[in-house]
Image (cartoon, coloured by chain):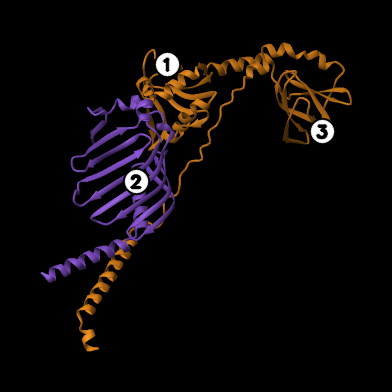
Amino acid sequence: MVKIIKYIGYLLFFIAMLLFFLPKTNLYYLAQQEAKKYEVNIFQEEVEQKAFGLELQHITLEYKGIESAEIQKIESCFYLFYNDLNAYDIELSSLVEGYFPRKIKKLHMSYSLLQPLQINFYAEGAFGFAEGDLKLLNREFYLHLKPSALFLKEYKNSLRVLKKLENGEYSYEKSF
Amino acid sequence: MKNLSNSKLLSILINLLFLILFAKFLSVILLLFLPFESQTSSKSNIERMSYRRFNFEKLITGSKISEIEPNRALKGADNITSMVLVGLYGNSKYGYAIVAMKSAPKKTEIISIGEKYQGYKLKRIALNFVVFVKHNKEYILRLSDFPNTKQMQKSVNTVQNDEQSVAVARSDINAYIKNPTQIWRDISIQEITQNGEISGFKVGKVRKNSKIARLGLQRGDIILKANGLALTSYNAAFKIYKDINKLENLSLLIKRGNEEKEIIYEIH
């Protein structure tokens, strides 16, 4: 029993060291290249490698060459069993101005080995508060939205594509 | 000392050190397969070309001709032989002339009425010449190789057959901006690619009696340029879309069948 615990301890230590030494900046560059194949460009002014994560500053996202969002800061942590990503102060392109409030204060995404086929997220901003998940196996996307007064007042057309719930909140489901 | 070297603690430390080295080794191996450089910004330097429409017809025909009083300047005026008049725009009260010295015809200068060039003050602009004044004497500088007005008019009319001018209410544009989903109800547009590159945007459908239908676009039209900017990317197209409420004029170069046609929108 002691031996098993010892080996598990060694394994955990090895994983921790592996994550520590992982060339996270270069993995990010690889992710940039892969995203580019899908016409998603990610540019940043600064990349800082942390012990178990990565921090990006002043990020610009482009889709099909269209500047889609500017993000002040992204922090990501890789613990293998639990990984998360936090994006702060997101400003969406003025192109979405007619559909959606542009400012998103925070977006949090997490992936845990306890739910290996699911990515969870929540976001808050001028639009209100939203949480949801992405089911990788079933290829389903679910969003639950608590719209802000601004969203309810100025973006009525956008709310039409969402399903209104009894409590005045909204949901959206899509398979892809 | 012997006890220390045999201690379990040392064994554990050696094992941990080995694991650290192994983890580092794997990371270095992995690093060899990863890119070393970040993607550099491709922020395109597509400059939005503002559209300026010059009414060349006014320049050479119509009411301006009657304002010119050609004979008045001709009487007693000398010709300037040391200069060339490359171009002109305006009328007797307002406008500018593009002039150069004969010795350096490529070194042109633009002078407006009232300004001096080589000691000559530009007094007036006529149909095919300008009038300078020096020491209270009038001098004439003529456009070289200026075709007669009838020929010019004919050429202008020919050009205008491929050109269509449409007045657009800014309120209509603002209505679409406020409700963008309406745009895609009224029109569908899809990119056209050639060798994997976008060469323009094709109009799929235009809803009858919609505001967009009044813009003169037809199903099958391929929009090639907007304000002189080739629409070879989504970015270029959306740049125009983003700035549409700031524009006063918009020109679209479209391909309809085998012909290219320019539609000019004047936004009021």
* Residue under numbered circle 2: A35
Of tags 3 and 1, the one toward the viewer is: 1
What secondary structure is found at the residue carrying circle 1? loop
- The answer for which chain carries disc 1 is B
* Front position in the image: B67 or A151: A151
Shown colour of chain B: orange
Callout 1 amino acid: Lys
What secondary structure is found at the residue carrying circle 3? loop
* Front position in the image: B260 or B214: B214
Q: Residues within 10 Å of mark 3 (few under 14, many from 20)?
A: few
Residue in view at x 63 percent, y 17 percent: B57
Callout 2 amino acid: Ala
* Residue under numbered circle 3: B118
Q: Where is residue B40 in the image (x, y as percent from the top left)?
A: 45, 49
Answer yes or no: is residue B233 visible. no
Q: Which chain is purple?
A: A
* Residue B234, picture quadrant: top left
Distance of mark 2 from mark 3, alpha carbons?
A: 61 Å
Q: Residues within 10 Å of mark 2 (few under 14, many from 20)?
A: some
B158 sits left or right of B19 in the view: right
A95 sits left or right of B164 in the view: left
Callout 3 amino acid: Gln
* Residue B142, picture quadrant: top right
- The answer for which chain carries disc 3 is B
Q: Residue B211 carries which label?
A: 1
Is there a contact, CB below 8 Å, between mark 2 and mark 3? no
Distance of mark 3 from mark 1, alpha carbons?
A: 54 Å
Is there a contact, CB below 8 Å, between mark 3 and mark 1? no
